[in-house]
Amino acid sequence: MINKIINKIKNKVSKKQIIYFFGDSKELDSRISKKQEDNFDLKIEIIKKNIRENKPFQINIGISRYNFFKLFDIVKFCLELENKKIKSPKINFNVYPLSSLVNNFNRYLREITSILPKNIKLKIYDKDLEKILLKFQELDLHKADNVDDLVRLFGVLCEHAFIGPRVIVVDPHHRCNTNCTHCWVHTPKIKHCDEFLNMSFPLDRFKKLVDDAAKLKVETIILQGDGEPLLYKHCMEMLRYARSKGLDVRFFTNGILLNEKIAKEIVKIGVKEIYCSFPAGTAKTYKKINPIQKPKTYNKVVNNLKKLMEIKRKAKSESPRVIVTHVIHTQNHHELVKMAEDDVYEKVDAARFYLIRLDVMNKFLQLKEHEFKEIKRQIPIVEKILKQGGVEFVDNIKFQLENYNKKDGSWSKDIFLKHGCAIGWYFNLIPAKGDISFCCHLRTVGDLSKQSYNEIWTSNKYVKWRKQAKFMKDNMDVKFLNNQTLFDEHCTHCDNHQMLLEIFEKLKRFDLWRYYK
């Protein structure tokens, strides 16, 4: 059967004397070629057979949005099939400056063409490639957005990471001074072993990560996650080092340790944003949600936030932007208005109301139907209070309410199943032990104790996972290094859903949505 197929392709090739290649791997080649007879392995066999029989042939490298940045590697692959080597140094495509993208591309093609033997030619296979290049060039010329973010968006369409993610989230350690009932790590229902609690992110490893991140044009480092960052002895040094390398730095906190000394330090460092989790409007509810803390801690957090804002104003500093985050569930749904009033009293910069991310351990906090209705009633009132008080209302909750599934408390499942996930170009989570996660849940793509961040980010495996996530509906059961699947229950309560919606909104706003798949 195989011989018949080979002979069929051979006859076709002998007529045209042309064989098309679109990549240096079966996956890339098949991604671009839509023809059944363009079988990667069979094409290789035909070339080898022609070489053995000393028959002339021509290779056309079909250029597409999915392979143009790999032309040198494809040429190298084709030459190696003929037992030849490239004598010139590697030729790379330069995405910067984006304002000269078309000229960059044409210059790159000329450089590649100059090293080609007579039997290999370049052919534009993707009729939309030039349109896409021109579109991004025009967007930059008109200053439509942050240039680096445009490059990431360009990467989504080309399925290639030209630069690093926008955000890297790091868990400095695993210790926390609260045990909030809604927390999936330190909930009272879980008792962690000492090995877990004592785990922390080494400072030297963090600095190497930041060095790589800066080279890859990462925009932001955020300290958050499995513990309270301000409890970690190297927290300030981490923030200071990342800031010294030109990265924006932010962190999450429960606000308990946010005293005057710390407040002055973070203003001095230039921390861009602080997210303070404050899930209550009264001391009574605060104690109920956080059993190990005393009711008076509620007032302590309020006063800490107020003091921070005073220090910031006295320093005449715009940073840090202080955002109070209210995680809403069955134990605090009735206090939304009081929370908003506190935000105004503290004179914080912004407030975010956010439905709980449900997990096995906090499922009992799922909203009942009447509680859900009460939240919908309160949100317009909350928004009005904040606006009148000069506090920005960060709108996460409206989308959650509109897409809320009353049966399981989810809100984000349909996004991923309809449009896939593009977070792989924008985000990383790195837990304290140093294993890099693909997204906001633990989907391991690499280990910093074994490889550098740059090596992991640019690895072939990571490239493959990004593409598979883009077509999530067809790849739901694909597994990462820790055997977590690409799609699971965490995707139904995704912390990254807002970022994903922003990506899709930009694609539509810039008239690029048609090229997404």
Image (cartoon, helix red, strand yellow):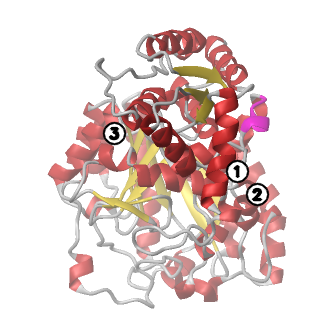
Q: Residues within 10 Å of mark 3 (few under 14, many from 20)?
A: many
Q: Is residue 313 above or below residue 403?
A: above
Q: Residue at x 62, y 72 (%)?
A: 356
Picture coordinates of residue 117 (x, y %)?
A: 44, 17
Q: Residues within 10 Å of mark 2 (few under 14, many from 20)?
A: some
Mark identifier at residue 316: none
Picture coordinates of residue 473 (x, y %)?
A: 70, 64
- Depth order, front residue of 198/296: 198
Residue denoted by label 2: 399
What range is drawn magenta here? 511-515
Residue denoted by label 1: 395
Quadrant of the snapshot with the C terminus: top right
Q: Amino acid at mark 1?
A: Asp
> Going from the N terminus, do you reach mark 1 or mark 3 first?
3
Q: Amino acid at mark 2?
A: Phe
Residue denoted by label 3: 213
Picture coordinates of residue 471 (x, y %)?
A: 67, 56
Q: Are marks 1 and 2 in contact (CB under 8 Å)?
A: yes
Quadrant of the snapshot with the N terminus: bottom right
Q: Amino acid at mark 3?
A: Ala
Picture coordinates of residue 344 (x, y %)?
A: 61, 50
Q: Single out the residue that lies furthest toward the front.
A: 53
Q: Quadrant of residue 468?
A: bottom right
Q: CA distance from mark 3 to mark 2?
A: 31 Å
